[in-house]
Amino acid sequence: MAEADLRAESDALLLQLLQDLEELEGKRAALNARVEEGWFSLSKARYTMGAKSVGPLQYASSMVPHCCVHTGDTQDGLQKLWVARAIPQIPEELGPHEPALRRRKGLPKTPEPEPSEAPGDPLNWFGILVPHSLRQAQASFKEGLQLAGDIASLQIRIDWRQSQFRELQKKLRQLEPGAA
């Protein structure tokens, strides 16, 4: 590859890297704003409802995630991360569904508990009529979670472009006259 081609490729890669860094700075600022807004709204809700009404004592006894992180490959072969709504999974039952011993007449059959459906909105843990500030806090933290996934993907892309740029710079140094 000619030196001019390497320089042009290096310049294009550097330009893309700088654009990615600018985008990363913007997303980090947006993430900080969402998290700050979420904590502020949460503190307003605690003030409105009382400090003991919004806290860990109101959490459900069995929590399940409402979102999860997925990974995949892009066209460039890089990893991409994104946050998606979690699909509730019911654990598989092992063994036969019929009891090993049959019951004799006279003993009532105990009904098997049905698996519970997907849990509703976690805001219901704090009551039916929750303040608007608590809903705002939830929305802010959800947006922040999405931004965190975008930032992670962007950081992977930036790291990859930096390594590509370093390799091109190394090749250019080897082509320079007087390089050993």
Image (cartoon, rainbow, N blue to C red):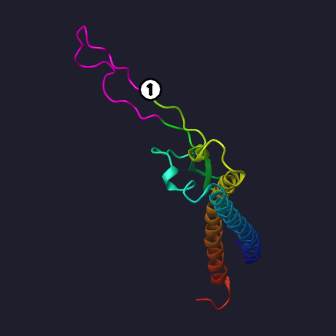
Q: Quadrant of residue 36?
A: bottom right
Residue 97 picture location, percent across and down: 34, 21
Q: Nearer the viewer, residue 136 or 166?
A: 136
Find the residue positioned furthest to the top: 105
Q: Main secondary structure of the magenta part?
A: loop
Magenta range: 90-113
Residue displayed at 51% across by 49% down:
59
Would you say 52 lies left or right of 76 here? left
For disc 1, the neighbor class at 10 Å (few under 14, some 14 to 19, many from 20) is few
Find the residue positioned furthest to the bottom: 178
Residue 139 picture location, percent across and down: 69, 52
* On screen, residue 48 above or below 99: below
Q: Nearer the viewer, residue 145 or 47?
A: 47
Q: Nearer the viewer, residue 13 or 22?
A: 22
Residue displayed at 58% across by 47% down:
126
- From the image, tell me which residue sits under label 1: 114
Give the tally of numbered discs.
Answer: 1
Amino acid found under the numbered disc labelled 1: Glu
Residue 1 picture location, percent across and down: 69, 71
